[in-house]
Structure formats: structure tokens, C-alpha cells
Amino acid sequence: MEQHNQKLCYEFLKEKIVNKEPLSLELVKEVHRILTAGTYDEHRYIINQERPGEFKKHDYVTGIYQVGSPAEQVESDLEELIAEVTAYKGNDILMAAAYLQAKFEYIHPFADGNGRVGRTLLNYYLMINNHPPLIIYDEDKRL
């Protein structure tokens, strides 16, 4: 399911990459909706009333003691991050992309699928800034 969704997401992003469309909240939410379609478990979907393409409504533990941004702050934190990386005009695009992905993961805006979305946004940002995408192997995700 996740591989199929990733292919659908790439198809969705192809023209946006060619046109170098900047990041936006709408783009982030649509990437999440496509990547997580059909993957939310019963607890998230029925009990917590969370849906693919919507920001989290509850706090989730993302590390040993971390919960990311509080649910009510997610949208403003993401808007700030998007504005920050969009305004970046320096030459170190790889560092800016890594910052985008790391800060996105810290915000942890969705109930599930944050890693998939963060890696996709990292590559989207690289490609709209004339850099090739990165391949992140499963065994390297925890490093």
C-alpha cells in the first residue's frame, strides 16, 4: 500500500516539480493524504477522528520524551517553517532541505506518516531547487 501511494504521490508532484511550485500548507496536506490513504488504523480513524490529509488532533510521542508541536500549534509552526525555507536564497540547498525535513519531523504535524511525508518534502524541495532527489534506505532511517 505504501509503495503504491508513493507512486501516486510522485505522479501528483511531477508537474509541480517541473513548474517549481513552492511549498505550501495545501501541498503538505495533499502529500500526506496521498501517502497515507488506506493506512490509518481503527484507533486513529474511528476513535481519534483523524484522517489522511488533516493535521493531528492529539499529541503523539515521537521520541523518548518528545511529542512535537502541540496539535493546536501545528498549522502556525508549519507555516513558519515553510516561510523560512521558501525565503532561503543561499547556496547550500542540501543543508536547507535537511533542515526542512528535520524541523518537519520535530513538528510532527500528522497522527501517522510523518516520516514518509518528511522524506517526500525533502526530495520535493531539492528538486524544485535544481538538485537530484536523495534515496534514504530503510536501514539509515534511524541514524
Image (spheres, grey):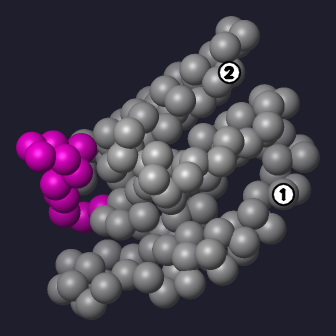
For the C terminus, the quadrant is: top left
Residue at 12% across, 46% down: 64
Position in image of residue 118 (x %, y %): 50, 48
Q: Is residue 49 left or right of residue 11?
A: left
For the N terminus, the quadrant is: bottom right
Q: What are the residue bounds of the magenta stretch?
A: 55-68
Above-or-below relation of 21 to 34? above
Query: Can you identify the residue that label 2 sits on?
Result: 93
Residue at 68% across, 42% down: 134
Position in image of residue 116 (x %, y %): 50, 59
Above-or-below relation of 62 to 94? below
Q: Is residue 86 left or right of residue 33?
A: right
Q: Which quadrant would residue 91 be assigned to in this image? A: top right
Please name the amino acid that badge 2 sits on: Ile
Q: Is residue 50 left or right of residue 94?
A: left
Q: Is residue 77 magenta?
A: no
Task: State how far apart marks 1 and 2 are (Cα).
Answer: 20 Å
